[in-house]
Amino acid sequence: MKKKLSLIALIGTAGITSSHAATYILSGTIDPIQATTNASNVGSGSGTISGDYDDSTNLLNYSITWMDLTSAVTNMHFHLGAPGATGGVQLAVAGPWTSPQMGSETLSETLETNLLAGNWYLNIHTSDFGGGEVRGQVEVSPVPEPSASLLALGALPILLLRRRA
């Protein structure tokens, strides 16, 4: 009977063990107010950033949408910088640029560190604003790990067998 209970416990808790890998959700809003290169906040361009990042595979997936820019998009980058600060390009977004713009990239350890610290922003450059018409800070939130209640669920077969015995 003990062997049967041990096997059931192993099966019941398989796949519920915690690992150190984590998945993160990316989000953000894009507008001219955040664009330090568009000091007069010209235009009514807007958009969103969404995606996810898996720190075990280092894979970043993103989707960028925008509308109402004053002119055609000429370039797009993720930059290093806290909110309101400017910084160098971390990751180029390959064109041609059409909304929604989607992509996947594998990040280096340095890029991962800056992304997870909340120090990335997206800059969309246009013909009218070569330095960037709209900008959006990339917000990163970890996906919560399964709670202890799921672990208790794994022990349910043991409790049911004990009750029958």
Image: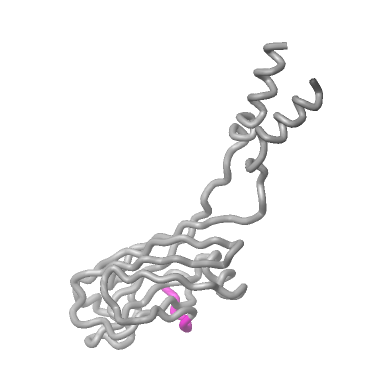
Give the residue at the far right of this rendering. Answer: 2
Which part of the image, by quadrant, shows the N terminus?
top right
> Residue 56, relative to residue 12: is it above or below?
below
Magenta: main secondary structure equals loop
Position of 42 with respect to 117 (left or right) is left
**Residue ID at (19%, 75%):** 43
Magenta-highlighted residues: 84-89
Which part of the image, by quadrant, shows the C terminus?
top right
**Residue ID at (54%, 56%):** 23
Q: Is residue 88 magenta-colored?
A: yes
> Residue 47, relative to residue 76: is it above or below?
above
Could you say where residue 46 lies in the image, as x and y percent from the top left? 25, 67
Q: Is residue 12 magenta-colored?
A: no
Position of 85 with respect to 147 (left or right) is left
Front-most of 86 and 139?
139
Front-most of 152 and 140?
152
Picture colour scheme: one colour
Position of 26 with respect to 14 (left or right) is left
Q: Quadrant of residue 70?
A: bottom left
**Residue ID at (57%, 41%):** 146
Q: Quadrant of residue 63?
A: bottom left
Could you say where residue 17 lies in the image, as x and y percent from the top left? 67, 43
Position of 94 with respect to 2 (left or right) is left
**Residue ID at (41%, 67%):** 137
Q: How many marks do you count on the picture?
A: 0
Could you say where residue 123 lies in the image, as x and y percent from the top left? 36, 77
> Residue 105, relative to residue 6: is it above or below?
below
Could you say where residue 110 lies in the image, as x and y percent from the top left? 60, 75
Q: Quadrant of residue 64?
A: bottom left
